[in-house]
Image (cartoon, grey):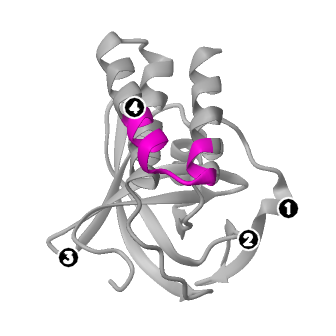
Amino acid sequence: MGLIKGGISEVIATTAFNAAPIGIRFQDKTASMILFSGSHTAENVERDGWVVANFIHDPILYVRTAFEDLPRDAFVEEPVMGRTMYRLASAEAWIAFTATVERKTEGAMMVRLTQEKEIIEEVAIHPVNRGFNSIIDATVHATRYRVNPDAKLRRLIDYHAEIVRKCGGKKEIEALGLLMGYISE
């Protein structure tokens, strides 16, 4: 695969008018993801059998898609292998996958991904920014914290929030404010 490398790549996954941050694992030439049961993403993947990985460098969008739905005009139709799939209009690059549920438990499902199409829409260089990376980590912890307000998760969020304040730019700081609003509701 070109855009997905070894380890876990954080993307914004899209299904039918749904977007959510997801980690895609690439190991031993196989791509997969774990989805939590009951989520719109899991329901759509199980029903439709596809998902699109969107590569975006916008910390605000990562936070928003973790906690709210985007308007329909945020999506673009893409014909892939005889199906209509949806990607984000603002994606710098994207990969369309066929998604096959391999294992399902009460709480989650393991999905194997088969790449069907990969497109780079825009070439951009993004220097490593610890603030951006910490927004991603804080968002992962915050989605779990909303389900289980555990003190350990809150400490992790606060740790990453401090890095965002120290190392982030204007968009990362704005994303942090948004994230903190979602977990204080």
Q: Which of the image's four quarters has the N terminus? A: bottom left
For residue 89, which numbered disc appears in the image?
Answer: 2
Give the magenta range: 160-173
Q: CA distance from mark 3 to mark 2?
A: 28 Å
Give residue 143's position: percent from left, percent from top: 48, 30
Residue at image position (73%, 42%) is: 69
Q: Is residue 164 magenta?
A: yes
Q: For the residues labelled 2 and 1, say whether their Cβ atoms are less than 8 Å apart.
A: yes
- What secondary structure is marked by label 1? helix
Can the viewer see residue 40? yes
Please identify, in this view, whether the residue under mark 3 or under mark 2 is nearer the observer.
2
- State the residue position of label 1: 73
| Three-letter amino acid code of the residue under disc 4 | His
Mark found first going from the N terminus, 4 or 3: 3
Residue at image position (48%, 40%) is: 165
Residue at image position (41%, 78%) is: 115
Mark found first going from the N terminus, 1 or 4: 1
| Three-letter amino acid code of the residue under disc 2 | Ala
- What secondary structure is marked by label 4? helix
Q: Which of the image's four quarters has the C terminus? A: top right
Badge 2 density bin: few <14, some 14–19, many ≥20, Cα 10 Å: few
Mark found first going from the N terminus, 2 or 1: 1
- State the residue position of label 3: 29
User: Magenta part mainly helix, strand or loop?
Assistant: helix
